[in-house]
Image: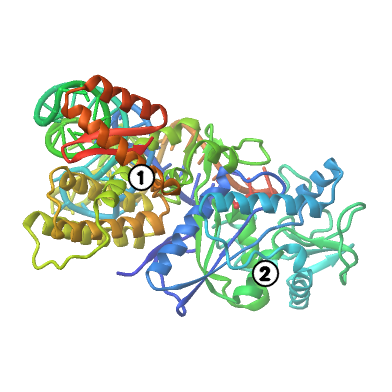
Amino acid sequence: MAIQVYNTLTRKKEVFEAKNERVNIYVCGVTPYDETHLGHARPSVIWDVIKKYLRWQGYQVYHVQNFTDIDDKIIARALNEGKTAQEISSYYIQDYLESMAALGVEEADVYPKVSEHIPEIIGLIEVLIAKGHAYAVNGNVFFDVLSFPEYGKLSNQKLDQLQAGTRFEVDPDKRNPMDFALWKAAKPGEPAWDSPWGKGRPGWHIECSAMSQKYLGCEFEFHGGGADLVFPHHENEIAQSEAATSKPLAKYWLHNGMLNLKNAKMSKSEGNFVTVKQVLAKYPKELVRFYILSNHYRSELEFHDSKLDEVARGWQRFNDCVQKVASVIKEQQDPVEELAALDAQLLEAVEETKQQFIAAMNDDFNTALAIANLFELQSKVNSYLANFEPSPMSNCVLQQVYKLFKQLAGDILGVLKLDSTNVEGLTEPLMDLILRLRTELRKEKNYQLADMIRDSLEELNILVEDTPQGPRWKFK
RNA sequence: GGCGGUAUAGCCAAGUGGUAAGGCCGAGCUCUGCAAAAGCUCUAUCCCCAGUUCGAAUCUGGGUGCCGCCUCCA
């Protein structure tokens, strides 16, 4: 079954077709002038999962994500703190990369920076001027929106309906109020580069056009980013790239919904945000990913402190189930001739879950539904586990269960947190010993002592459960 | 003023024409020395109004609420 994605450009779901085996992805990255917040984590986690899923489906993936390291706010912050813009941006780029690594997000193949692509940017602006899509005035270069009839096609805006200048002053040098800067003349104290139009620096949108073209060419498969980038950023990117090359910039435009805090968009400029590092200090990364992936990527997502607590229990139970399976299966594969009814049933459920997972992900990367499918299998597995007899058959089936969970929930979604119950190889035998002793005590009906052991272990964050198959333990 | 999104149980959340996935919370039960874990059962007619249809949460029209974008923003 084919993958379908919702394309902002056409405002409908489309069948995904890659030009070849390699799927090219450009995701708009951050402007590094402040700490990485949870709003940034959303697209990163989503694209991390999309990449891993596509790879699992047999595609190769090439992912480019930019850093806009030349920007008004970086400069402002630098002046404020008596540092260079470069010091500010590299500090927060580092913060971003660390935060993403801490979330288990795989790195992009390339992280191009504006400051390292000035020649490409100038070259692109020259092309636009030569083709009559841009004009230079007093050291600034503006894009002429009227020269690009398709302007507004991504955000579905009509030029005469847009209200430029409602809250900021329109530069009198612009021919049309909606024209936007490709190159900004240098102001005193700002970082600047030489150009045919004098010293200056790139405008906001041009870097993505220049860098995506350099690394991915034209009409690459995916262009992603937050919904707040649709206009003007992505609209302007399309105008610049397509005016210059006369070819489509990207095939599929995917936009993730905003993450809200206190009913308002999480935003650096509003001071309305929670950093990734703050959250990860309190919660495991797998839980944070689970929370993000429990919602469809296009819908808005509400965050407050209790949100993670609310989903934590369901997530924990899921992990417990996988952990239980892991602790029960044996490495060796005994020859199995035929399966008993219960085993066959479970094996069938495993295959069914896999198909459901694929169907969900193929439908515009519906991770929420994919997770629901995994939960259904969980319930069947727990049921099976509650009264199964260890046998080569059960071992064979449970190995399949584990493999699937590990693949889908672990490798692709990254929501699986399997305890390392074997700290330096000592914990395991030690626990065996303690539990063996405690079992003896219980046989002798010395429950007082048995309970004392269990309570003491709990104080060490080790939970002991007595099951019909014997005692079992896990970290709290 | 324009554009876009959204409204599903106490909470979170899938579902775009065929009679409401999944999770949390809650209630009851099973198992159990106790506890925990797990299992089973129960818990909504889908913002409002009108329409299309044999049939609508799902389509159309109107209304209301909330959010985003039009200004830096993932």
Residue at left 88%, top 68%? Answer: A194
Q: Position of residue A146 (x, y in %)?
A: 69, 65
> Is residue B54 rendered to the left or right of residue A148?
left
> Is residue A473 rendered to the left or right of residue A272?
left
Above/below status of B47 relative to A176: above
Callout 2: few (<14), some (14-19), or many (20+) C-alpha neighbours within 10 Å? many
Q: How many marks?
A: 2
Q: Quadrant of the N terminus of chain A?
A: bottom left
Kind of residue indicated by mark 1: Glu
Residue at left 59%, top 57%? Answer: A158
Res B40 quadrant in image:
top left
Q: Which label is found at residue A363?
A: none
What subunit carries mark 2? A
Residue at left 43%, top 73%? Answer: A59
Q: Position of residue B61 (x, y in %)?
A: 37, 46
Q: Earlier in the sequence, mark 1 or mark 2?
A: 2
Q: Which residue is mark 1?
A: A428
Please name whichever residue, A123 or A474, is drawn nearer the observer in this view of the structure.
A474
Q: Secondary structure at mark 1?
A: helix
What subunit carries mark 1? A
Q: Which residue is mark 2?
A: A211
Kind of residue indicated by mark 2: Met
Above/below status of A397 relative to A287: below
Cα separation between marks 1 and 2: 52 Å
Please name whichever residue, A229 or A360, is drawn nearer the observer in this view of the structure.
A360
Res A396 quadrant in image:
bottom left
Discs 1 and 2 lie in a common subunit: yes
Q: Position of residue B54 (x, y in %)?
A: 13, 50
